[in-house]
Amino acid sequence: MDHHRQPPLTRPKKATIVTHASALINSDPTALNPIIFCGAGPGDPDLITVKGQQALAAADLVVYAGSLVPEALLKWTRPECRHLSSAGLHLDEMVSTMADAWQAGRKVVRLHTGDPCLYGAIFEQMAQLSQRDIPYTVIPGVTAAFAAAAALGVEYTLPEISQTLILTRMAGRTPVPESESLASLAAHRTTMAIYLSISMVDEMTRILSKAYGTDGACAVVYRASQPDQKIIWTTAGQLAETVKKEKITRTALVVVGRVLDVSLEALVHRSRLYDRHFAHGYREAENHQ
């Protein structure tokens, strides 16, 4: 559900039920034209949502994450739409540009790679817009981990193999909470997709080898869904060596977990959802023969 709103910077202490986004729009008619934070998807311009495509088609200004969002996504905009890469802008410059355009009556789209809620740094932008009493809304997108699963031909959650997917990144110039270190998360040995960390592949290899074993199945997906996409199957122990051999230094996702070990021919544990002997609300179970 999209929320056209001017969000408080502190969360309500009492339960609040909202049945429709319009319930949060104030009486100002400009609130009907909020700034849109839009997920561009993993890179393939056709993997943007229909709603995102429609937002781009109506935009007067698109401020896009130029270091990550391919310019091919801008094909959905009108010829007269202004395109501005945020790669060289700091937060205040970016928000001021969007605010000025909005105040001039322009339709503004802030285009983020993948899904805006994941490593998108959108909350700080929302905070500044809220301080300026400028409404905004969010359109979700397809994150790289899901494009990677499609490219790999895997399911992250297999019955009795793994039922949990961890999306994380390693601590670098931007720290992570100590309780969420890669080592502590890897100890669960569940399916894990690691973002924004390929430059620290030596440390990653050490941590994953300890948790999953040196022979633990691992895959690297470079520029998932894009024309130059590259898929590399390897093991936790050979991860660093493989990545360096392929000269991959950025824009790559690392996937690790037992689900990568299961072949189509060797699938043993199956979901009960489609088991003929398993009943649920939409189907009766067949009798065992």
Image (cartoon, rainbow, N blue to C red):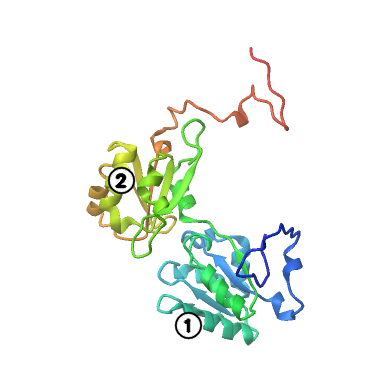
Q: Position of residue 140 (x, y in %)?
A: 58, 60
41 up-or-down from 234: above or below:
below
Q: Nearer the viewer, mark 2 or mark 1?
A: 2
User: What kind of element bears circle 2?
Assistant: helix
Q: Amino acid at mark 1?
A: Glu
Q: Is residue 261 visible from the viewing direction of this image?
A: yes
Q: Quadrant of the C terminus?
A: top right
Residue that mark 2 sits on? 207
Apparent side of residue 240 relative to residue 66 in the rendered image (left or right): left
Q: Earlier in the sequence, mark 2 or mark 1?
A: 1
Q: Is residue 75 visible from the viewing direction of this image?
A: no
Q: Residue at coordinates 50% horizontally, 56% vertically from top-left?
A: 143
Residues at circles 2 and 1 in contact by the CB criterion of under 8 Å: no
Q: Quadrant of residue 208?
A: top left
Apparent side of residue 8 relative to residue 146 in the rendered image (left or right): right
In depth, the one of 164 and 151 nearer the eye is 164
Q: Amino acid at mark 2?
A: Ile
Q: Quadrant of the N terminus?
A: bottom right
Q: Quadrant of residue 249?
A: bottom left
Q: Position of residue 205 (x, y in %)?
A: 28, 47
Q: Residue at coordinates 72% horizontally, 25% vertically from top-left?
A: 284
272 up-or-down from 240: above or below:
above
Q: Position of residue 6 (x, y in %)?
A: 66, 73
Q: Position of residue 243 (x, y in %)?
A: 27, 52
Residue that mark 1 sits on? 93
Q: Residue at coordinates 40% horizontally, 70% vertically from top-left?
A: 67
